[in-house]
Image (spheres, coloured by chain):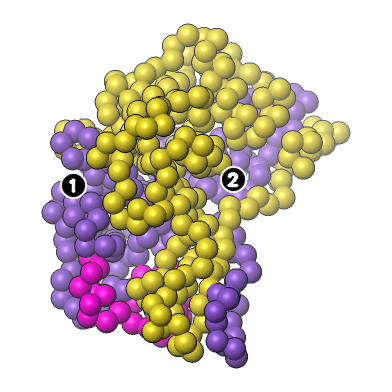
Chain colours: A yellow, B purple
């Protein structure tokens, strides 16, 4: 994705002060998310489906069952739009109008292609694992040929993308600033809880370092 | 939305054991989320955009600036797909193949219509607030006519929808169950932090009960 790529479909008109078009901002948002939402259109009917993703250079990797509609459409090379969103907080202004949300989102456009070469599929699987749980790939039982054959892996070229970021406190109109109404931000984050081990786990297997 | 509505576009084929088509399951997932992802197609180009939503009976309410592309398309009555997703945990199987994610998601299909009547727009604003921060609406300075005029509110009829839910521990193949590999779930949730008050807040304004 060239840094300068920007056509009408990815140009942000509303709240343009929240818009970012540089790779660094865009890729950081993509890489910090566990899931994305992929949309495609069949005839005039749009679909949007959540799925696990990972990024490799200027491509988004997706995977799933060979039979899944999403993967079938993606590998057909149909135009796609993919969105990644982090909800960072509720922004409580004194006025309803200026109440908002803090968030970081990316909307990107591209087309996909299937990865059929076995070593490249395995490499993609490693990238998914390293994205979700760095360190896990070296522990886990790798896919065998039968499993690889059941799995479709696709790479979506990021043709263009934009990020939209809102941070910080509410901005009320001057005339509202002395109203006796609480204003501020309630921050949110996707928080991990304590790992819950599978009841059938062999004795003596301790929690791996990468989950501490 | 009739409970029985289900055509090919909302029929879940992969992991059909995770599929739910009843209103109660579907609406609970929608109502617990702060944001949804709305997709539409212009010519053959799909778009997917994150936005705040609320539900009123069998409709999804959306709002935004009158000039936003999303709102323009929604109010045109174009076919839409809307997705709501909660990421509930990483599912670490002993094998890469059975590693997964716990999640609750809804994909719905419908068409939108603008709400232009002032009292109904205000009612919709109240529903947004009650959805995001129950109790806030009675405190906040309500929109005036100028603000209402700048805001588009749309209602999307939920024509059909399906939910997909995965919970619980990984399910490894029998032959992998004694491998010396940690297996289990790392739960995740969208967690609220301590409210951060706006620095310009008048003295003596304390945190409202609904934020405690």
* Residue drawn 23% across the image and 77% down it: B146
Q: Measuring 59% from the left and 32% from the top, which residue is drawn there?
A: A131
Q: Residue at x 67, y 25 (%)?
A: A137
User: Is any part of residue B133 visible from this angle?
Assistant: no
Q: CA distance from mark 1 to mark 2?
A: 32 Å
Residue A121 is situated, as x and y percent measured from the top left of the image, at: 51, 15
The tag on residue B89 is 2
The image quarter containing residue B208 is bottom right
To which residue does mark 1 refer?
Answer: B79
Residue situated furthest left in the rendering: B76
Query: Residue A19: percent from the left, percent from the top?
Result: 39, 49
As for residue A18 lying within the magenta part, the answer is: no
Quarter where residue B139 is shown: bottom left
Q: Mark 2 or mark 1, which is nearer the start of the sequence?
A: 1
Residue B186 in view (yes/no): yes
In the drawing, what numbered circle is on residue B100? none
Residue A24 position within the rendered picture, expressed as x and y whole percent measured from the top left: 51, 37
């Amino acid at each position: 994705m060239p840094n300068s790529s920007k056509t009408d479909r990815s140009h942000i008109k509303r709240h343009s002060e929240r818009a970012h078009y540089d790779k660094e901002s865009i890729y950081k948002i993509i890489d910090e998310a566990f899931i994305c939402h992929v949309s495609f259109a069949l005839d005039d009917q749009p679909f949007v489906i959540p799925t696990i993703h990972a990024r490799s250079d200027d491509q988004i990797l997706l995977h799933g069952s060979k039979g899944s509609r999403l993967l079938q459409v993606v590998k057909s090379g149909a135009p796609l739009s993919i969105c990644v969103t982090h909800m960072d907080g509720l922004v409580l202004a004194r006025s309803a109008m200026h109440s908002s949300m803090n968030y970081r989102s990316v909307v990107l456009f591209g087309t996909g292609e299937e990865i059929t070469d076995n070593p490249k599929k395995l490499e993609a699987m490693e990238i998914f694992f390293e994205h979700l749980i760095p360190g896990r790939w070296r522990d886990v039982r790798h896919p065998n040929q039968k499993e690889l054959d059941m799995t479709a892996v696709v790479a979506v070229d990021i043709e263009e993308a934009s990020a939209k970021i809102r941070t910080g406190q509410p901005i009320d109109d001057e005339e509202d600033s002395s109203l006796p109404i609480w204003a501020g931000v309630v921050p949110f984050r996707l928080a991990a809880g304590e790992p819950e081990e599978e009841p059938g786990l062999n004795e003596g297997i301790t929690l791996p370092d990468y989950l501490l």
